[in-house]
């Protein structure tokens, strides 16, 4: 059964609207649109009578009201893909109001997480979870954050990726918790799954999911090549000096985020003994 997102549904990526994406699957966009969140965080509802909420989003009263209005009294579980503050803070309030079980991996201690998220169930890699009348398969995908989990709705061949794969942009990798090597490994892991479409944490449902994963991997490796070339040109460089060289195709207002991903690339290269840092300056390793 296909779950193509209609143009009508795609045009409704606006806060508070509940849009059907197919049998038993709905989406509500939170009102936190911005530079790094696009139209806002996608909250997905699974099931009609018994409901599971995936990525409840920021602790926002209007978004809470929209979720409760759409789900009714039947919320049984609240699942998160990861615990960055645009994805999980509303989980605790939903659980308090409905008695729902909190599902996800605990927040890492890097200072960038929602420390209020206290899961009652930690999904195992490959575990099948009941989500309303649906069933989701949990896939551990560290990289963007160490506790990222994607969820596969097997019957519809639809993959819910949180921030691991996004529409139109590549996700920021946030070291030290975020890890570029782990991210690339997780992309390869997802390629082995049987799915067609991707439902990201921000933006619309994407067709040709395997092609998107392949293009994203190619993009990451091309950026790595620019890092190496930048180090060759500059001989030695601090992060702030190297960022505009490696990300000369990215708007300046995004450079503070690009700098984080650049650091993740450099950490990967250091582990591979291809680059080294000393006194805040990065150089290619002389082999």
Image: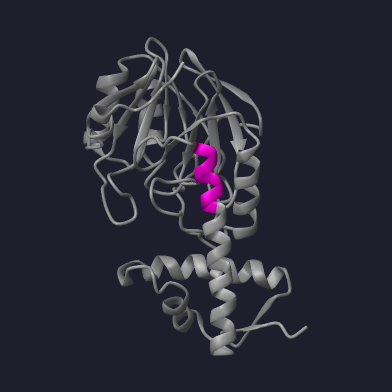
Tell me the residue at 38%/25% (across/down): 4
Q: Residue furthest top?
A: 49
The answer to whether residue 285 is left or right of residue 282 is right
Residue 260's spot in the image, x, y percent?
48, 67
Tell me the residue at 50%/37% (across/down): 209
Q: Nearer the viewer, residue 19 or 58?
A: 19
Is residue 219 shown to the viewer in this render? Answer: yes
Residue 127's spot in the image, x, y percent?
64, 26
| Stretch of the chain drawn in magenta | 209-216
The answer to whether residue 209 is left or right of residue 90 is right
Number of dots carrying numbers: 0
Is residue 144 shown to the viewer in this render? Answer: no
Query: Hey, which quadrant is residue 258 in on the image?
Result: bottom left
The answer to whether residue 216 is left or right of residue 205 is right
Residue 170's spot in the image, x, y percent?
45, 54
Color scheme of the displayed model: one colour
Of the 4 image quadrants, the one containing the C terminus is: bottom right
Tell me the residue at 28%/33% (across/down): 10
From this view, report whether residue 284 is shown above or below residue 271: below
From this view, report whether residue 47 is shown above or below residue 278: above
Query: Hey, which quadrant is residue 47 in on the image?
Result: top left
Residue 206's spot in the image, x, y percent?
41, 37
Q: Nearer the viewer, residue 20 or 94?
A: 20
Q: Nearer the viewer, residue 199 or 52?
A: 199
Main SS class of the magenta portion in the image: helix
From this view, report whether residue 5 is shown above or below residue 268: above
Query: Is 104 colored magenta in this rendering?
Result: no
Tell me the residue at 53%/66% (across/down): 223
Query: Is 215 colored magenta in this rendering?
Result: yes
């Amino acid at each position: 059964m296909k779950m193509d997102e209609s143009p009508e549904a795609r045009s409704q990526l606006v806060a508070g609207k509940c849009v059907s994406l197919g049998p038993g699957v709905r989406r509500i966009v939170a009102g936190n649109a911005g530079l790094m969140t696009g139209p806002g965080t996608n909250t997905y509802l699974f099931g009609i009578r018994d409901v599971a909420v995936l990525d409840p989003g920021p602790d926002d009263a209007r978004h809470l009201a929209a979720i409760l209005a759409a789900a009714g009294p039947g919320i049984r579980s609240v699942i998160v893909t990861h615990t960055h503050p645009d994805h999980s803070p509303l989980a605790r309030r939903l659980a308090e109001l409905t008695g729902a079980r909190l599902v996800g991996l605990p927040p890492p201690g890097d200072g960038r997480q929602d420390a209020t998220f206290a899961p009652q169930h930690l999904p195992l890699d490959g575990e099948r979870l009941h989500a309303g009348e649906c069933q989701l398969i949990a896939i551990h995908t560290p990289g963007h954050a160490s506790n990222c989990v994607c969820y596969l709705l097997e019957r519809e061949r639809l993959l819910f990726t949180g921030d691991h794969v996004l529409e139109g942009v590549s996700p920021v990798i946030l070291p030290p918790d975020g890890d570029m090597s782990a991210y690339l490994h997780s992309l390869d892991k997802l390629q082995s799954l049987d799915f067609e479409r991707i439902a990201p944490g921000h933006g619309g449902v994407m067709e040709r999911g395997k092609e998107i994963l392949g293009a994203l991997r190619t993009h990451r490796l091309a950026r790595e090549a620019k890092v190496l070339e930048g180090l060759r040109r500059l001989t030695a460089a601090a992060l702030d000096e190297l960022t505009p060289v490696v990300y000369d195709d990215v708007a300046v207002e995004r450079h503070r985020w690009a700098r984080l991903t650049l650091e993740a690339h450099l950490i990967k290269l250091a582990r591979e003994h291809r680059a080294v840092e000393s006194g805040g300056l990065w150089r290619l390793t002389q082999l």
